[in-house]
Image (tube, rainbow, N blue to C red):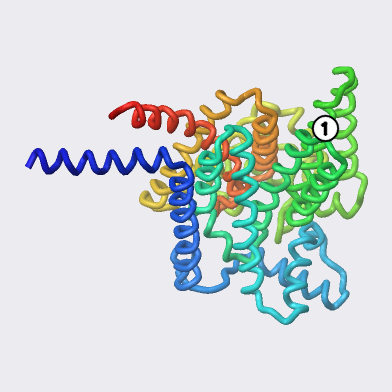
């Protein structure tokens, strides 16, 4: 009996060693597993909505009507409302699909294909940072096989496409800094524009892009910081003095609740008053423009930092959500907590890498938006940057994998 188990162990060990030593076979197996799981998750989701609502086919959310009606407005040449204007790119895709006579299922197909397409850019960044193709494949695989990300591919919402374009834009910004040719500067600008028109969160990528261009330019450090300050000031001035942008920021989607009101209300998760925290009141803030938000923060910094931290931690760590079952929360934590731990390691090990700095900046900007606005009931807002977290996780996982590989190949 012992000899039988010993022979089985030796066969398994020999097979594992053979696969590791034959990199192409190993990579091919990983890619096959990743694509198979990605296809399977989308199929079961489409057939019976196993990851979503329990109903198969195209999925809808309360925000879906905004995009669908916006597409109808575009087709009929009628004006957008202020919120539809913010999502012009996504509305345009739906309108295009309708014009050519296809149903909304075509939008879902576009989103699934874009997820596959963007995974290559995640792979390329992972390969570039770590210097190994297997590591890049693992990074892309963590993105494609995550059921909490795959869930959103079937929805008529911006989440799926914005996530894909955020990956592509991050890759393009890094690539333009590496190669420094007009061609790649143009590509990065176009990629950022696409992300910005899919979802307004993408406008922060202009700050990231131009700031990194300046930081890695060859001129005086003080001039660099002054230039970045000018960029941020111009960006903020646009949100204040361009009426359409200012008005679209003033109120939360599908409501008449202003950002200042949400701040004084202590709103953590949109739509959940029971989770609000107590905040200092300011009667003068009620009917003012959203820009008064910042004067309130200046007056009550400690309370605002507390509220912002609650919002960010609630979204990023999926806590303070009593409506989620224990089983569901365990599944979430199995996907995100190891990822965060490995991402911390990856950031530490590759902290001097330019791409890592860009990724960290993009992630922090998106967390800042959550802190300044609200967390989401369905946790959609952390999906945008979760693939970039997985990229950092791959950077933390690969050195551990290399140690295992050395251990296996050292034995006879």
What residue appears at the point 63 percent right and 41 percent down from the top-left corner? Answer: 266
Residue 158 visible in rendering: yes
Residue 390 visible in rendering: no
- Comparing 235 with 152, the one in front is 152
- Comparing 132 with 64, the one in front is 132
Mark 1, residue position = 213
The crowding category of the residue bearing disc 1, from other C-alpha atoms within 10 Å (few below 14, some 14 to 19, many at least 20), is: some
- Percent position of residue 349, x then y: 55, 24
What residue appears at the point 78 percent right and 61 percent down from the top-left corner? Answer: 89
Q: Residue furthest bottom?
A: 101
- Percent position of residue 50, x then y: 44, 65
- Comparing 76 with 288, the one in front is 76
Determine the image quadrant of residue 4.
top left
Q: Residue furthest left?
A: 1
What residue appears at the point 75 percent right and 51 percent down from the top-left corner? Answer: 195
Which quadrant of the rendered structure holds the N terminus?
top left
Q: Could you tell me which secondary element the residue under label 1 belongs to? A: helix
What residue appears at the point 79 percent right and 45 percent down from the top-left corner? Answer: 188
- Comparing 162 with 66, the one in front is 162
């Amino acid at each position: 009996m012992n000899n039988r188990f010993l022979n089985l162990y030796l066969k398994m060990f020999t097979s594992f060693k053979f696969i590791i030593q034959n990199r192409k076979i190993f990579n091919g197996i990983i890619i096959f597993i990743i694509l198979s799981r990605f296809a399977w998750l989308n199929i079961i989701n489409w057939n019976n909505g196993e990851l979503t609502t329990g109903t198969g086919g195209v999925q809808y959310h309360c925000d879906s009507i905004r995009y669908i009606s916006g597409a109808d407005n575009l087709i009929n040449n009628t004006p957008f409302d202020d919120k539809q204007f913010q999502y012009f790119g996504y509305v345009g895709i739906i309108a295009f699909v309708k014009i050519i006579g296809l149903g909304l299922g075509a939008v879902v197909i576009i989103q699934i294909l874009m997820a596959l397409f963007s995974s290559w850019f995640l792979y390329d960044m992972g390969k570039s940072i770590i210097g190994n193709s297997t590591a890049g494949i693992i990074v892309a695989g963590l993105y494609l096989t995550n059921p909490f990300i795959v869930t959103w591919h079937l929805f008529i919402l911006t989440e799926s496409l914005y996530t894909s374009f955020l990956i592509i834009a991050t890759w393009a910004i890094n690539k333009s800094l590496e190669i420094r040719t007009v061609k790649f500067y143009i590509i990065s600008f176009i990629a950022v524009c696409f992300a910005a028109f899919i979802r307004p969160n993408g406008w922060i990528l202009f700050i990231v892009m131009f700031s990194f261009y300046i930081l890695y330019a060859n001129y005086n450090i003080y001039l660099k910081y002054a230039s970045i300050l000018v960029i941020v000031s111009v960006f903020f001035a646009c949100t204040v003095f361009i009426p359409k942008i200012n008005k679209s920021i003033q109120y939360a989607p599908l409501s008449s609740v202003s950002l200042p009101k949400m701040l004084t209300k202590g709103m953590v998760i949109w739509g959940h008053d029971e989770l609000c925290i107590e905040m200092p009141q300011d009667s003068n803030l009620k009917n003012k423009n959203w820009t008064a938000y910042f004067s309130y923060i200046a007056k009550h910094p400690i309370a605002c930092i507390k509220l912002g931290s609650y919002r960010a931690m609630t979204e990023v760590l999926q806590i303070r959500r009593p409506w989620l079952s224990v089983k569901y929360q365990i599944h979430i934590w199995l996907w995100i907590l190891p990822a965060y731990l490995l991402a911390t390691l990856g950031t530490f090990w590759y902290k001097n890498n330019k791409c890592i700095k860009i990724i960290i900046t993009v992630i922090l900007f998106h967390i800042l938006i959550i802190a300044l606005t609200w967390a989401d009931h369905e946790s959609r807002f952390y999906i945008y940057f979760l693939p970039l977290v997985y990229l950092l996780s791959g950077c933390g996982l690969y050195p551990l994998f290399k140690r295992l590989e050395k251990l296996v190949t050292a034995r006879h």
